[in-house]
Amino acid sequence: MKLLNTFLILFILSFFTSCSGSKNTIDQAMSDEMKMEVAYIDNQMPGPDKDLENSRYISFTVIPGPGKLAHNWKPVSLWAGKDDNSVETKIFDDMEFKGKGEPVYRNTSRTGFAELPSTIDVKVILVNEDGTMIELTRKDVVMEVVY
């Protein structure tokens, strides 16, 4: 009886997990309609509050196909790296839905990039106000040092 109860609980949990997972799938068609530009910056400009550990940041610009953005977007995650050296973050300058009716959507992440190499790949996952997720990638983004 104990084995049957355990099996039943596992079955119910797997059912709910599979149902909730299908909601968070990437809309590939919508992803293919969008383009992304990425700036990987190492800000070496002098300043009174200069924090060398956090001098690197990644800004990205999402560009819709022809026209303006039909939805508001917010970031879910950003992965950056090369080979075995990578970082994933969920911290961005702006965590609100924005962009509908605009020609582009922009955002920046400033956390955890200090140890990355000078050339990286970037993957950004965004979600719109309807819950649709897109994944945009850029390969071989070269770091720009700003003095």
Image (cartoon, helix red, strand yellow):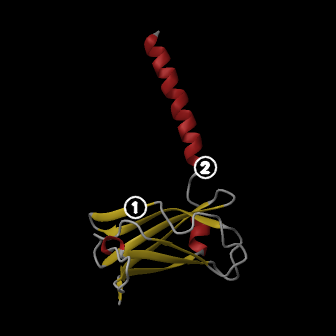
Q: What amino acid is found at the position of numbered circle 1 in the picture? A: Glu
Residue at x 38%, y 68% (from the top left corner): 80
Identify the image quadrant of residue 94. bottom right
Residue at x-position 56% and y-position 34%: 15
Q: Position of residue 26 (x, y in %)?
A: 56, 59
Question: What mark, if any, has residue 23 been given in the picture?
Answer: 2
- Image spot of residue 47 (x, y percent): 38, 83
Disc number at residue 88? 1
Q: Which is nearer the eye, 77 or 63?
A: 77
Tell me if mark 1 has few (under 14), some (14-19) or many (20+) residues whose alpha carbon lies within 10 angstroms of its own: some
Report the amino acid beneath label 2. Answer: Lys
In x, y percent, where is residue 60? 50, 76
Secondary element type, mark 2:
helix
- Report the residue that reaches farthest toward the top: 1
- Could you give the CA–CA distance between mark 1 and mark 2, rounded to whole angstroms? 22 Å
Give the image quarter of residue 120: bottom left
Give the quadrant of the C terminus. bottom left
Q: Nearer the viewer, residue 135 or 129?
A: 129
Whether residue 145 is situated above or below residue 49 in the rendered picture: below
Is 142 drawn above or below residue 16 in the view shown? below
